[in-house]
Amino acid sequence: MVQRMHRQIIRILEKGYGVFFGAACLVLALFCFYHLDVKYVDSWDEARHGVNAYEMLENGNFIQHTYNYEVDTWNLKPPLSYWGILLGFGMFGCSVFGLRFYSALCYLLTGIVTGLWVGKRSRVGGILVLGFFCANTLPLYAHLARAGDADSLYLMLFTFAMLSMLELSKNKKYLYVCGLCFSLAFLTKSWHAGMLVAIGGLFLLVTGEIRRIKWKEWGLFLLSIFLPLALWFGWRYGADGLMFFRQMIEVDLLARTGTANFEGHSGPVSFYWEMVFGNTAYIYPWVLGVCVLGGLALLVYLIAQRNRSAGAKNVVQERDKDETNGISERTAGEGIPDNTSSSLLWQYGWGLGLWFGVVFFGFSLMKTKLIWYCYPAIVPVFVLAALILGKCIGWDGGEPGEESGEIQENHTKTVKNWKNQILPGMQLLLIVGCVVVVLHFMKGAYETAIRDVHGDGFQDFLKLSASQDSAYAGWDAYIQVPGEKPEQLGDWDQNRLFLAEISGNFRCKDGGVVAFLQAGPGCVIYLDRENYAAFAEELWDCEVLYLNEGYPYVVLGR
């Protein structure tokens, strides 16, 4: 009964794999795009990238990015992520949804491609890994899947490079995919892409693949890396010489990675463990536990396989010595178990281990700590956990990794009982456990990243108060509304500046009421009611351009 129920579930999953996989993709798409524009625009990387992209569009310059129409020397990333935002602007207009669209799309593609890769090895695992992507609370909430910055595109390219790396033993053409993905990752997040070099180099060494690459393949690999970089370098050099590249090295590489207090983002070595992988509020420690237990079991199996292979080889050699006939006809590997499967498992193990370990420990040792730096280390944990759980759920009790088979008649009663009752019962419990755990953390991710997010009153007012078609669109804009730093009253925060630009195409000026009063005609100022009342005498001759009773703000013009 138990065995029949287990086999029926596996049969349904196998036959309906396409339907289940498609449904899981749709759920992941929901997690990516639903209410994508509800949350307020973050004032740091998201707003900065949005301004850079919008001003590229306004300036007609798609290589040199600016902030408030001056060359940006704070955001020192190459332009690929800005072009992604421009794609969203082109499809959905200059809006918050357009700002975030390409990030959501990249995360969705990352999940689908990862699911397809896992699904080729375990169909149950392919569906399960998509559930993990839906339960991935932190990247869905902060600075990746639903944010208009560079991290989602970077994660996608990083993941594609790593999955290609795992396929090198099958086809060396994947080497060129790795090279191209590294190049594009560098053009997205700059020096962060160095992690790919470290992982790839170690993988080639420990697996011995480095000895099997021909000179021609090395040449094409280097071309796949340096051709896109050379095109960008030449284009950017023509815009402002070596200035941008010098800033990339001095600020983005040396200062930000080597100095904890450069921007105040410090933390202990245990930062990523405490905040992510050891935090039981999220799914990460649970899937990491599966990886540790499954990895140890796999290691024992692989060592046993090697020992059996060596023993079988010795038996064949001893038998050959004793036999007097047919020695010359015996093939070299006859009677020895095939090690192709084991070698591939070793490669996958090394690849996934390096993928996680280099990212996790590498960023843990760096001085600057930001939670999204470790996001690429989450994917290999999801992949390995899905493979392990998928294989365990579908295992028939024979050699690990084999497809289901019939129980032999000469098996003992104990073995039959194990295969008929105990193992299927444990597998049914595992299926139920996987469903419950994934749904629990999916619910948490939905509530945190989608349902409970909220906007900002002044940001909403900014979006309502102006449009590209309004009579005062394109004017100089001032502000006298309390912001992130009370001592900088009268200055534009980055998120407000972004919304002012995309809403009214304003040219944002700092200085508040004092600067506004000194300016000539053709300018607007945003005020809250308190500051409006405080400066009523000075502003008596200004026209009220927009006032909404639902918000305590007003727009004046002159």
Image (spheres, helix red, strand yellow):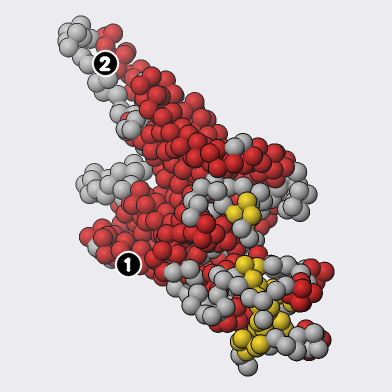
Mark closest to the chain's N terminus, 2 or 1? 1
Rounded to the nearest angstrom, the CA distance separating label 2 from label 1 is 49 Å
Q: Quadrant of the C terminus?
A: bottom right
- Helix, strand or loop under label 2: loop
Local crowd at mark 2 within 10 Å, few (<14), some, or many (≥20)? few
Residue carrying label 2: 332
Q: Which residue is mark 1?
A: 23
Q: Is residue 506 left or right of residue 21?
A: right
> Would you identify the image quadrant in which residue 489 lies?
bottom right
Q: Picture coordinates of residue 138 (x, y %)?
A: 57, 62
Q: Nearer the viewer, residue 365 or 295?
A: 365
Q: Residue at x 45, y 64 (%)?
A: 89
Q: Quadrant of residue 453?
A: bottom right
Q: Residues within 10 Å of mark 1 (few under 14, many from 20)?
A: some
Q: Is residue 127 above or below residue 526?
A: above
What x and y, as percent, mark residue 178?
42, 37
Of residues 399 and 256, the one nearer the viewer is 256
x 39%, y 56%: residue = 109
Picture quarter with the N terminus: bottom left
Q: Residue lying furthest top in this view?
A: 324
Say if residue 294 shows up in the picture.
no
Q: Amino acid at mark 1?
A: Ala
Disc 2 marks a residue whose amino acid type is: Ala
The residue at the point 64 percent across, 55 percent down is 70
Q: Nearer the viewer, mark 2 or mark 1?
A: 1
**Along the line of sight, which residue is nearer the eye, 250 or 397?**
250
What residue is drawn where x is 26% and y is 23%?
335
